[in-house]
Amino acid sequence: MTRTVPCLILPALLLALVGCPKAPPPEPPPPPEVVVEAPPVKREVPAPVQELVKNFSRVFFEFDSAELNADGRDALDANAAILAEYLDIWVEVQGHADERGTTEYNLALGQKRADAVVRYLLGRNVSTARVKSVSYGEERPADGRTVETAYSSNRRAEFVVSWSGEAPVRGTLN
């Protein structure tokens, strides 16, 4: 019996090693699909937006005041008409103050100035969804000098104009 066991084991081993065909290796997955997005097409700034940017360059205020003067109202009237005609234009009104006064006071004054401009536009039937306000107080001076002409330049509201999802346009166009 001792001879039969090795005789049976040897053929079984040979059959195991040689007799079973191996499965072919799986195919590698296809390379990932590369999607190349076309660069965004830079559209020319529409004429109404250019007009808004020109008119909305700045509105100035007197010392310690958030009252709109006649020049500011005239510019805002012209822009309200454009906003009424072109519904794909939005405006952010940014209120500013000169450096005199505390930071908190100037932030509040800048907000009052921005809100005065927004209220004026809303009174000209511009939708609240298309106009918003923010205050920067004294933090973004137009003129960093400490003389009266610089102070008067810093007491202002500036505008960021956006249209149809395009990038905002600040102040003037280059």
Image (cartoon, grey):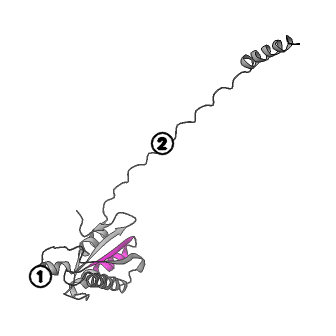
Q: Does residue 173 lie above or below 70 as drawn?
A: above
Q: Residue at x 72, y 21 (%)?
A: 21
Instruction: Tell me the kind of residue under disc 2.
Output: Val
Q: Would you name the residue on which mark 1 appears?
A: 148
Q: Would you name the residue on which mark 2 appears?
A: 34
Residue located farthest toward the right when viewing the structure as drawn: 1
Q: Which residues are magenta?
A: 78-99
Q: Residue at x 52, y 37 (%)?
A: 31
Q: Is residue 117 on the magenta stretch?
A: no
Q: Secondary structure at mark 1?
A: helix
Q: Residue at x 69, y 23 (%)?
A: 22
Left or right of residue 32, residue 20 in this image: right
Q: Which image quadrant is residue 107 in? A: bottom left
Instruction: Tell me the kind of residue under disc 1.
Output: Glu
Q: Nearer the viewer, residue 174 or 87?
A: 174
Mark 1 vs mark 2, CA separation in Å = 60 Å
Location of residue 63 in the rendering, given as x and y in whole percent from the top left corner: 19, 87
Nearer the observer, disc 1 or disc 2?
1
| Quadrant of the image containing the N terminus | top right
